[in-house]
Image (cartoon, rainbow, N blue to C red):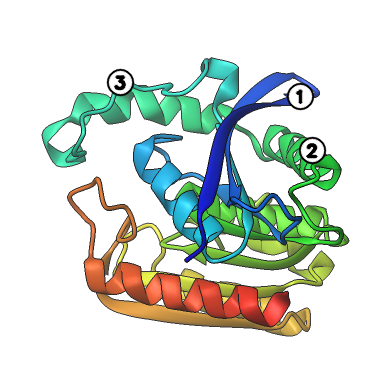
Amino acid sequence: MTSVQTTDVDVPTEDGVADAYLAHPGDGLPRPGVLLYQDAFGLRPHLRSMADRLAGAGYTVLVPNVFYRHGRSPVFELPEFIDPAARPQLWEKIGPVMQSLTPELAMRDAGAYLRWMAERPEVADGPVALTGYCMGAALALRTAGTYPDRVAAAAGFHGGRLATDAPDSPHLVAEHITAELYFAHADADQSMPPEQMERLDAALTAAGVRHRSEVYEGAHHGYTQADTAVYDEAAAERHWAALLDLLKRTF
């Protein structure tokens, strides 16, 4: 692991300014870029630590506050340890904010994040990689299909509702994707049942997308998030191994 330099940054978008966190190796040399998409709880210390770990492995990582239209992070007042079962009022605040980030708005923002990364001296020339968690997995999938020339690889972990019957389901972008994809589903995840896993794989296969999907047995939705009650250390470390393997193959 190399030394890491971090800073808070502002990313101009078509609808305002997204606050974000940038982490990169301390030598300042241009490194492959990774856009890290948050879960529903948002940009917070734990996601910063995840970005730091990726940066220590040799990447320049941007973590935008995708809820910036509702304020700078932290958008929600969170406890140090998040147990949603004991705090239902937390979801009452998060739910409407999540729903307000429509696919159209999210992909408009994605273009801004990718343009910003392309202009940064800390980011090497060429396409970047994406990794997303929970709702971020859907954002990563949509971004890979919306900006295929800018995305070389994308990973999604414990993503929900990735292949629904809705006319704007994330999996419907499959035909546009040129990146290699990796998905790690939680087998105890009601938001991503087996029929959706199958539908996602079928769409990617039909579109000729290089991809791999795995089910982490015994893991729950959110298993990578160490500041939550559903954290699973073994599954989280498996996720790190898979993600770093994908990045090594890509760059």
Mark 3 touches mark 2? (CB < 8 Å): no
Residue shown at 72% from the left, 59% from the top: 31
* Mark 1 and mark 2: Cα distance apart in space: 8 Å
Instruction: Name the quadrant containing residue 220.
Output: bottom left
**Amino acid at the residue labelled 3:** Glu
* Mark 1 and mark 3: Cα distance apart in space: 25 Å
**Label 3 secondary element:** loop
Q: Would you say 159 lies left or right of 144 here? A: left
**Amino acid at the residue labelled 2:** Trp
Residue 60 on image: x %, y %: 65, 53
| Residue 117 seen in the current view | yes
Q: Quadrant of the C terminus?
A: bottom right
Count the numbered circles shown.
Answer: 3
Please tell me whether mark 3 or mark 2 is closer to you in this view.
2
Asked whether 152 or 123 is in front, the reply is 123
Location of residue 127 with respect to 206 vertically, above or below: above
| Residue 64 seen in the current view | no
Q: For mark 1, does the 10 Å Cα neighbourhood hold few (<14), some (14 to 19), or many (20 or more) residues?
A: some
Mark 1 touches mark 2? (CB < 8 Å): yes
Q: Earlier in the sequence, mark 1 or mark 3?
A: 1
Q: Earlier in the sequence, mark 1 or mark 2?
A: 1
**Label 1 secondary element:** strand
Q: Which residue is mark 2?
A: 116
Q: Which residue is mark 1?
A: 12
**Label 2 secondary element:** helix
Q: Which residue is mark 3?
A: 77
Residue shown at 55% from the left, 80% from the top: 245
Residue shown at 58% from the left, 23% from the top: 68
